[in-house]
Amino acid sequence: MFRTSDGVGRHVAHEVAALIRERNAAGKATVLGLPTGSTPVGVYRELIRLHREEGLDFSNVVTFNLDEYWPMKPDSLHSYNRWMRENFFNHVNVPEANIHIPRGDIGRIEVEEFCRQYEQAIVDAGGIDIQMLGIGRTGHIGFNEPGSSKSSRTRIINLDPVTRRDAASDFFGEENVPQRAITMGVGTILSARKVFVMALGEHKAKVIYKSLEGPETPEIVASFLQSHENVEFVLDAASAAQLTSVKTPWRFEHVEWTPLLERRAVVWLSQQEKKPILKLDARDFHENHLTDLIHESGPVERIRQRVFDDLLGTLCPQPGGQSPTKIIVFSPHPDDDVISMGGTLCTLCDQGHEVHVAYQTSGNIAVFDHDALRHVDYVSEFLDLFGLQTPASMQLEQKIRQQVAQKPPGACDGPDVLKVKGLIRKTEAVAGAHIAGVPGERCHFLDLPFYQTGQVHKKPIGQEDVDIIAALLRELQPTQVYLAGDLSDPHGTHRMCAEAILKALAAVEKENVTPEVWLYRGAWQEYDPHEIERAVPLSPEVTLRKKLAIFRHESQKDAALFPGHDEREFWVRAEERTKNTARIYNELGLPEFYALEAFRRYDGIL
């Protein structure tokens, strides 16, 4: 387990590199099984670095990719063949003849023979030395969906609805995701001499727990790896969070009792026993493997009171402080500000602080075509109504309509359509911020260059992105900044935006621009109670304003183009999350509030 995703990628890459060097020295080939997706990108980037800077030689490496969508042309934007070349093969010296990727461009009648030949090619290469894997939310490895046999081999398979839903953002809608794929089988994977399973993020924690601590079952295909003689699950802290040895380490070994671990243990004990913290007694501690905590930090009454006071101190009805100050709320997408911390945004404005919102990306790829055309219709009717229509405006309208009509399913939008969609998100953001109390002139649209690809996959953060944010920090000289703290996915927009902000903060620090830095969570998760360092109470009235601000994002309201792992509307997720945090605080014996928004102070590690 590594604290961050960077550690996961480096560890696996260096294990692979060590084997390649060993085999090269012996004059032998190295056979690798390779995955695609966001999880292994860190591995590939480190392997590319080792090739460029340390001379790691891939000329005697043979590769077999796990899977490919079917049907799928190899040069398609969504092809794993194309993805592998853009993210790895084009940057290292693996010979073309040594690269094997399942073909998505063959006819259905040819698939069985191709799969047989793929299996034979693996045998002819001497078998796979290292198989790298990600893991899906259903527990699938490769595209071996729930129900796959432990002895299965390379074949065509129907994709699970959850798998297709998770892939929807890459295809600009679930309806564009292929129904089937060609995948290595479970038996093929288990035949590898060494297996690395990588997982990143909170949304993988439950399936990691089931894979490692549940029974072997076809319903969680990754659980079959329990019987492999040489497998490593390489996890970041977020994906490992549900493992028993991580969640409650005191049950298995002696631990060093830090204040944070003490708080975590007492909160867990309170929830386990369904008692408020101040009602826990010595028997509760002894019966739940916390006797050592009493010996190290007791007596019980002192531990109990210390943790209660610590949590009580997180309640912060004046998050901006007593005196009016200047604050920047960074919002990766145009609605993250109101979805994630809309109540705090209202509170800061109501308490007289000068609050600015910096929208880091346009969010233009997350607008349905029908919404874009509806706005085009409005502008056209408006111009007609007031006699302002011109040949140029009619020509532009026709051009935009053609770009939408001629776009193949799952393809990127044309430049003019992207401008329309970006304008929709911008005007919605201003309207939402206004509800919270932020005037339009304090809304800053940074349009960071890393996002401007028109695709779901973005460029790495560059100096230009950092410079844009640093300029805003220098101009406003804020006392506080807030940024999205969803940092588990190393290639997710939230983490990339956070990376740009933190680099910009480091750049302006020598100029005495040193604001407090607070992290908020996005639409899917909340901080666990032991992690919370600031909890801002929300009244029913403020919660309603937050909901109304979210409503102003009409293009995202009823059904977002990229709903993520939760199909509830954003306002429902946001309201239920904040009410749940308040409920947890109440059950711990703390004051009862209608809702709470939670924050953590940035601790210097991304």
Image (tube, rainbow, N blue to C red):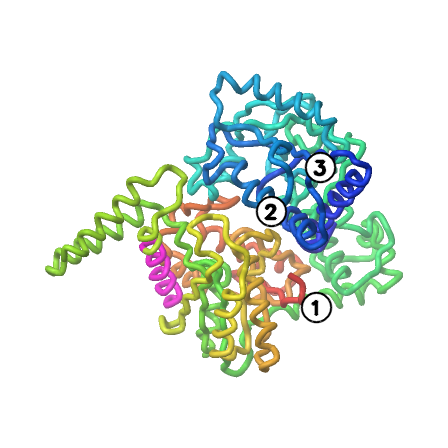
Viewer-nearest of labels 3 and 1?
3
Locate residue 232: give its quadrant.
top right
- Residue beneath the point at 74% across and 53% down: 269
**Image location (x, y in percent) of residue 132:** 68, 38
Mark 2 is on which residue type?
Answer: His
Inter-mark Cα distance, 1 to 2 = 51 Å
Which residue is at the front of the view, 110 or 25?
A: 25
Which residue carries the number 3 mark?
A: 60
Locate residue 412: give its quadrant.
top left
Which residue carries the number 2 mark?
A: 91
Which residue is at the front of the view, 51 or 338?
A: 51
Q: Are marks 2 and 3 in contact (CB under 8 Å)?
A: no
Of pointers 1 and 2, the one earlier in the residue sequence: 2
Q: Are marks 3 and 1 in contact (CB under 8 Å)?
A: no
Which residue carries the number 1 mark?
A: 310
- Element type at mark 2: helix
Mark 3 is on which residue type?
Answer: Asn
Residue range in magenta is 420-435
**Image location (x, y in percent) of residue 177:** 46, 35
| Res. 273 in view | no
**Image location (x, y in percent) of residue 441:** 36, 73
Inter-mark Cα distance, 3 to 1 = 58 Å
Inter-mark Cα distance, 2 to 3 = 15 Å
| Relative horizontal placement of residue 99, taking residue 228 as reference (left or right) | left
Q: Are marks 1 and 2 in contact (CB under 8 Å)?
A: no
Which residue is at the front of the view, 538 or 412?
A: 412
The overriding secondary structure of the stretch rendered in magenta is: helix
Of pointers 2 and 3, the one earlier in the residue sequence: 3
169 within the magenta span: no
- Element type at mark 1: helix
